Image: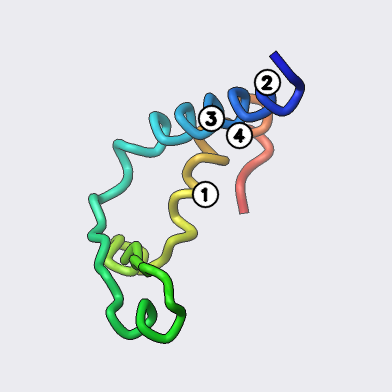
Amino acid sequence: MTDSQSTTLDIRQLVLEAEERCRPYMWETPVEHSHYLSRISGADVWLKLDMVQKTTSFKLRGATSKIMALTEEELDRGVV
């Protein structure tokens, strides 16, 4: 296995672990095809509508993943 294959597998594993940590706190969000953006870009464009999350933000996924991965010691110092 090459270094790039190993890195890809490591990243995939990290993504799967983050998804597992966050799933209980996330709502399913729709994906919609943008005819306008597809037409002007010449590519098939789909939009992930995370603005329907309770926080109306896509940032919820990253923040939740990071907080859920903190150690007890890190949590004891607090999160801002």
> What whole-number distance in Å separates the C-alpha atoms at marks 4 and 1?
16 Å
Tell me if 28 is positioned left or right of 4 in this view.
Answer: left
> What whole-number distance in Å separates the C-alpha atoms at marks 2 and 4?
31 Å
Q: How many marks?
A: 4
Mark closer to the observer (2, 4): 2
Q: Residues within 10 Å of mark 2 (few under 14, many from 20)?
A: few
- Dot label at residue 6: 2
Q: Residue at x 32, y 43 (%)?
A: 25
Looking at the image, residue 15 lies above or below residue 52: above
**Amino acid bearing label 4:** Leu
Q: Residues within 10 Å of mark 1 (few under 14, many from 20)?
A: few
Whether tag 1 and tag 3 are in contact, CB under 8 A, the answer is: no
Quadrant placement of the N terminus: top right
Q: Residues within 10 Å of mark 3 (few under 14, many from 20)?
A: few
Q: Residue at x 31, y 47 (%)?
A: 26
Mark closer to the observer (2, 3): 2
- x and y, in percent, of residue 13 in the image: 53, 24
Local SS, label 2:
helix
Quadrant placement of the C terminus: bottom right
Local SS, label 3:
helix
- x and y, in percent, of residue 77 in the image: 68, 38
Looking at the image, residue 20 lies above or below residue 57: above
- In the image, 49 versus 3, the foreground residue is 3
- Dot label at residue 62: 1
> What whole-number distance in Å separates the C-alpha atoms at marks 2 and 3?
10 Å
Tell me if 37 is positioned left or right of 14 in this view.
Answer: left
- In the image, 9 versus 40, the foreground residue is 40
- x and y, in percent, of residue 46 in the image: 34, 66
Residue at the disc numbered 3: 12
